[in-house]
Amino acid sequence: MGNLPESLIKARELGYHYVGDGENIYPALKGINLDVRRGEYLAVIGPNGSGKTTLLKLFNALLDPSEGEVLVEGISTVEHDKIPMIRQICGMIFQNPDNQLVATTVEEDIAFGLENLNIPSAEIRQRVVEVARRLRLDKLLLHPPHQLSGGEKQRVAIAGILAMRPRCILMDEPTAMLDPAGSKEVLQTVSDLHKNEGIAIVHITHFPEEAVFADRVAVVNNGCLVKEGSPEVILTDLKLLHEFGLIGTPAVELAALLRNDGFKIPNETLHNRELVRALCSFRPIN
Amino acid sequence: MSPSITLGQYLPGNSLVHHLSPRIKIAVLIILLILLFSLQNFIALAVMFALVLMLLAASRIPLRYFIKGLRPILLIILFALVIYIFFTKGGVVLLRIGSFTIESEGLRQGLFVITRLLVLIILSLLVTLTTTPLSLTHGMGYYLKPLSKVGLPTEEIAMVMAIALRFIPTLMEESQRLMRAQVSRGADFETGSIFRRAKNLVPLIVPLFISAFRRADDLALAMEARGYRLGAKRTRLHEDVIATRDWAALLFVLALLAVSFYFKL
Amino acid sequence: MFIQTDKLTHIYMQGTPFAAEALSDISFSLAKGRVALLLGPSGSGKSTLIQHLNGLLKPTSGQVYFNGNPVGGSKAELLKLRRRIGLVFQMPEEQFFSESVYDEVAFAPRNLGLADRELDHRVERALARVGLEPALFTKRHPFHLSSGQKRLVALAAVLSLEPEVLILDEPTAGLDPAGRRRLYTLLDDLNKKEGLTLLIATHHFDEAVALAEQVLVLYKGKLAMDGSRNKIFSNREELVKLGLALPPITEIMHDLADSGLPVNRDIYTLEEARTEINNLKGSGKNES
């Protein structure tokens, strides 16, 4: 099969600015150098307006770079005739579950992307049924979107992308409008796809609790990539997070306060159970 | 949370009527409507009514959906019947109340009109209950295709109609929520002159419009992200395949039409 | 009791084959000046219940009482009710339709028939209460504000009714952490400094718990739990069965207590947790 590039998506000196009315230029991204490796789960966090969404749109060729370039499996996103291929490789899920479902039934919506790829009808039907089974949507195939819960709607959106056989799923705050049960549903689904099928995930989120499951976390602020690393390193770096108006998970925040009070808690304590374990050495003597 | 029962909503099923091709159903409907409104012979109309009832049974859709569909026009039907019975004169006098008469012509014409109305509604319901809105839209798009030769973007129009269908229940729920929210702020959408009420609708219309535009923006982006391109060729999940039974149905109704013209029914 | 329901039941589409019981037999009471949380998974009936409290929906059976009087009646009576019970819907900035913050905030008192001078006062007071300087904000276009500011304006648009009760449905939906904290600080002030009675329905109650005195839990249309904050959150297993989790800090304290550490479980904020855990010092051995 030849040498598949290690990086699924490569952003080189990527920059983007919006042009407002008149001569106003609004810079959104500057000098981003970021790779998304094959099969990796990358979380992108940052305050509102930091450019995270713009970054995702550049990955999926919804926008053309103002500076630099984005390569998806070696193909530059400015090669407009290759865009269908790029969008098949990198699918995108949006924040508002309702505003991405276009069809009158679940099965038609899942089929939408395949119809755009001009896949023959028989194969479309087969893929729709298969993907619905994998995401436990088979009983809902004939249902209209407005009868679904938020979590179900997002799963349908994921199914629609999955049917296109992507190598990467880009997600822009997919749980922002869901209740806890729906969020859990979606995150579990995505995590399974990542683990079982090696699909790369780029997940923009506000919630540090969601980023703990990633392989790598990138922090974006004011259009720049500030830092990237493992969740244990990034999500426990409260100085960094607080600087950009983000907060750590309760375990991380509490661990930091207690460390200041003299408790011995390892610096990279991320999860509740780690904090509990560290504190358990304070069992009273009697 | 409330389940929505839109008039003419699709009900999944496995009947013969369900399996007919949507394009054929549209054609058959049009032909049957032409037949319906050209029939003058009362017996022929009764036969047609019976035929339609048989179709209703064949669709295996519970009667209550048809009754629900007829309910809005029940009043009109009764009203029409009353008007004809009491005010159309001719033929044999059936009943005399003082100087007031009910005559057979009135009864006949009344029954004629309401039978026509009933058949019209039942046939339309049959089509909308057994065919998904999307395939109906595509079916109509098919018949409009010749217009694309004169520059009408029929594929895109079909897509727009399908999207509109998809969002009707969503928009209805949203407007209900919005209305309640504004009522909680003291808004009143019911009292006052027609001008006053129109002005009072601003807090309802403006937010709905804004939300609709935002939806359209989001949706367009999502569609693009999934590879949709204006004007590009697309395949379809469900192809509308015309089978033997579809041709049979079409020929049957054409034969009915021919017979009725030949015998001047 | 300020707000009370008695065997409140609501059946959607009654009499049709699609009838569904959204609320069954709900009886609870909320005292004046209290802060109560209304929890429950999606579809449990929270929104339906809220809409009964200001008369938007009529019960199929049972009754809602405000200040001892049954809720309902003519449009005039309902209007009078709604000037005393303010209801803030989810994503309230989606209701904006005016070209100035002034008009948006004045909409509600204008509907009450108040005169222009009083309207000015109301708008000023409402904006000041939510922390937006009236002089800076009244002329601005609501759509040009930041999302946090929009939320505050929407809140002011209900506060201009000068209600005694504020019912909020997911008040922090769509806000970032800073915005959430600001909102709950504001609600706390409104309750503590002005005696506003609050009922907050939410899925995300991490910050809300700090204010809550009473907690109501709905499950499939029934009132599954009703009690003080401590009582409700001491019962982790029951909450999990109802599809809910403990607030994150409380969860940590439960875990610590379950592991044998002598800590209180009724802890809801970071600061309280810190203080409580620091009490372990002096009785433990591994200090740095």
Image (cartoon, rainbow, N blue to C red):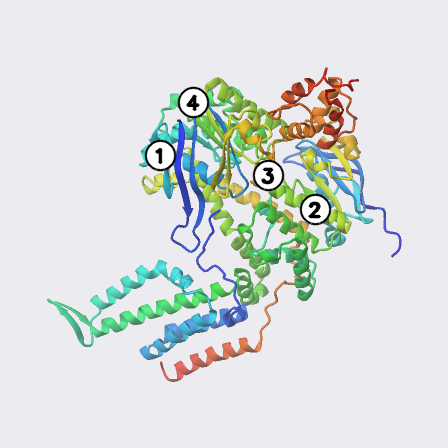
Crowd rating for badge 3 (residues with CA inside 10 Å; few <14, some 14–19, many 20+): few
Q: Mark 1 highlights which residue? A: C71
Give the mark nearer the N terminus: 1 vs 4.
1
Task: Measure how far apart labels 2 and 1 are at the Cα level.
Answer: 47 Å
Q: Residue furthest right?
A: A2
Labels 4 and 3 share a subunit: yes
Give the amino acid type for the residue marked by disc 4 in the picture.
Arg
| Vertical relation: C123 (above or below) B154 | above
Dot 1: within a 10 Å radius of its alpha carbon, few (fewer than 14), some, or many (20 or more) residues? many
Q: Is B112 placed above or below B156 here?
A: below
Q: Chain of mark 2?
A: A
Q: Residue C154: x and y, percent? A: 50, 30
Mark 2 crowdedness (10 Å alpha carbons): few <14, some 14-19, many ≥20 = many
Question: Real-space Cα distance between discs 4 and 2?
Answer: 49 Å
Q: Looking at the picture, how far across and down is residue C78, in whole percent?
A: 35, 34
On the rendered image, what quadrant is the C terminus of chain B found in?
bottom left
Amino acid type, label 2: Val
